Amino acid sequence: MIDNTEKTAALMGKMKAALPMGAGVTARAHEALRAESPDLAIPRRCEITTIYYFGDEGGIVCTLDLPDTKNAHIISITHLTFGRGDPLSREIRAYQKHRIRRLRRLDGRRF
C-alpha cells in the first residue's frame, strides 16, 4: 500500500471542511494544464473546490476552480503547493512527501 488509509481519510476530512482552499500549481503541472487548454490563461494560484480519493493508485486529487468552465481540471495533490500560513500545509506536505517517496520506491521513477 502506498497511502496510510486512516491518515489519508483524516486529512481529506480536514481538507473538505476547509474548502475552498487556495493552492499553487507546480511548474510541471502548470505546463501540462496549459498544453491541455492552450486558449486558457492558467493562473499559478487557484482554488480547490472538491477533493476525491482515487484509491491507492491515484491518491488524493483535487478539482481546481479555473476560468474555463467547460472542463473539469482534476489534479493530484502532489502537483500542488500550499502556503506556510495554511493551517493544513504541514499535514498536506507530509502526505505529499510520503506518497512521492513510496511511489519512487515502487517503480524507481523520479517525480
Image: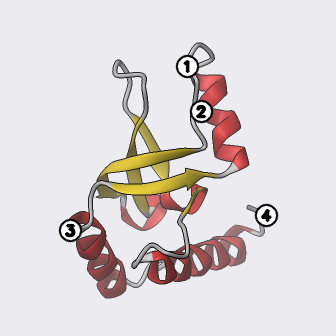
The answer to which image quadrant residue 69 occupies is top left
Expressed as whole percent of the image width and height from the top left, the position of residue 64 reads: 41, 42
Instruction: Quickly name the residue at label 3.
Output: 17
Q: Residue furthest top?
A: 39
Kind of residue indicated by mark 4: Arg
Q: Quick one: label 4, few (<14), some, or many (20+) residues within 10 Å?
A: few
Nearer the camera: disc 4 or disc 2: 2
Q: Residues within 10 Å of mark 2 (few under 14, many from 20)?
A: some
Q: Considering only order in the chain, which callout, 3 or 4, is on the residue closer to the N terminus? A: 3
Residue 97, by quadrant, is bottom right
Badge 4 element: loop
Residue at the front extreme, as displayed = 85
Residue ID for mark 4: 110
Decide: marks 1, 3 in contact (CB < 8 A)? no
The residue carrying mark 2 is: 33
SS under mark 1: loop
Residue type at mark 3? Ala
Q: Residues within 10 Å of mark 1 (few under 14, many from 20)?
A: few
Which numbered marker is on residue 23? none
Q: CA distance from mark 2 to mark 3?
A: 26 Å
What color scheme is it? Answer: secondary structure
